[in-house]
Image (cartoon, rainbow, N blue to C red):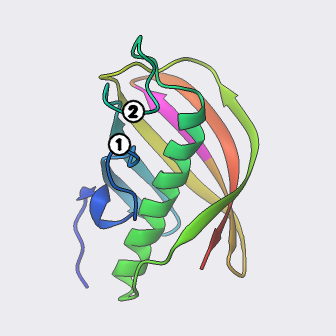
Amino acid sequence: MTLTLPMEAEKLVPHRLPMRLIDRLMEADGKNGMVEACVSADSPLVSLDGELEEVALIELMAQSYAAIKGYSDLACGKPIKQGFLVGVKRLVRLHSAQAGDLLRINIRTVAELDDFSVTEGEIWCGTIMISHGEMKLWVN
């Protein structure tokens, strides 16, 4: 199957609005990639003053991993598998994001064992790193 990037995230992840926080997969290189997300003021994870809540950071990274994995599955002619976030390690929030900000989420898979993956993620707004951390995921 021939796939082209960028690709809308809705085609790659099971999440639907308002819980789909990512917009499009921009780059994919095997198990790594980059995703874009525009922080929507309508998101349930944005406070009344327009700030993206801290809990959304790990969800942005998890959904970004799902988009990269979904793209990889489709490129191999396989159905998109379902996955679950099973752990978070060393999540650091350096700055806040606001409604209207365009975020770039970089994901790198650092280890895999059977159906489990360990990934590192970074969230950027322009040239400012907002957050970074490590996740453990299970894909069935």
| Quadrant showing the N terminus | bottom left
| Quadrant showing the C terminus | bottom right
- The residue under the point 62% across, 20% down is 94
Q: Secondary structure at mark 2?
A: strand
The answer to whether mark 2 and mark 1 are in CB contact below 8 A is: yes
Q: Which residue, given by chain and number where applicable, does mark 2 sit on?
A: 103
Quick one: 41 or 109, which is closer to the camera?
41
Are there few (<14), some (14-19), or many (20+) residues within 10 Å of tag 1?
many
Are there few (<14), some (14-19), or many (20+) residues within 10 Å of tag 2?
many
Does label 2 or label 1 sit earlier along the sequence?
1
Amino acid type at mark 1: Glu
Q: Secondary structure at mark 1?
A: strand
Q: Which residue, given by chain and number where applicable, does mark 1 sit on?
A: 36
How many numbered circles are shown?
A: 2
Q: Residue furthest top?
A: 49
Q: Position of residue 3 (x, y in %)?
A: 24, 73
Query: Compared to 84, does 122 lie above or below?
Result: above
Q: CA distance from mark 2 to mark 1?
A: 6 Å
Q: Position of residue 121 (x, y in %)?
A: 59, 45
Query: Magenta region's main secondary structure?
Result: strand
**Magenta residues?**
121-125
Q: Position of residue 45 (x, y in %)?
A: 47, 32
**Rendered image quadrant of residue 67:** bottom left
Amino acid type at mark 2: Leu
